[in-house]
Image (cartoon, rainbow, N blue to C red):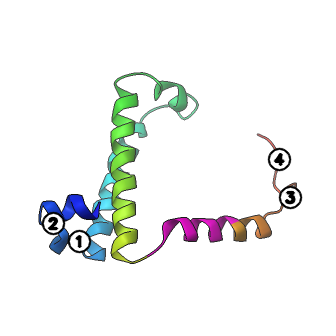
Amino acid sequence: MRQFSADRHWTGYHDPKSVLLALVGEVGELAELFQWLPADEARELAKDEPLRTRVGEELSDVLLYLVLLADVLDVDLATAADAKLTAAALKYPVGTGPGPI
């Protein structure tokens, strides 16, 4: 991401607010793909084209902006995610949830 952005002289636009707003916009585009789909059919419908390709494109945009935002803010995503999962495991031990749906 750093090299891609630097090669295009985009790094000057990558302040936290701008990157976050771009990320939110991409999440909105992803949500739009599912907005009017029946919830109980969305997973199956997303397996077929052209929705499958569009979902992949929007998920990629979300991921790339998320990685960029973490880089701009100097956050190690792997470390932060691991810490979050560890804390969640302590807060919600196995067997304490509502059970299978």
Q: Main secondary structure of the magenta part?
A: helix
Residue occupied by mark 1: 14
Query: CA–CA distance between discs 4 and 1?
Result: 43 Å
The magenta segment is 75-85
Residue 82 highlighted magenta (yes or no): yes
Query: CA–CA distance between discs 1 and 3?
Result: 42 Å
Residue occupied by mark 2: 10
Residue located at (33% from left, 34% from top): 54
Query: CA–CA distance between discs 3 and 4?
Result: 8 Å
Residue 45 highlighted magenta (yes or no): no
Vertically, is 3 above or below 87?
above
- Mark 1 residue element: loop
- Mark 3 residue element: loop
- Residue 21 in percent (x, y) is at 29, 66
Query: CA–CA distance between discs 2 and 3?
Result: 47 Å
- Choose the circle earlier in sequence order: 2 or 3: 2
Q: Is residue 69 left or right of residue 76?
A: left
Q: Residue lying at the far top in this picture: please name it.
A: 48
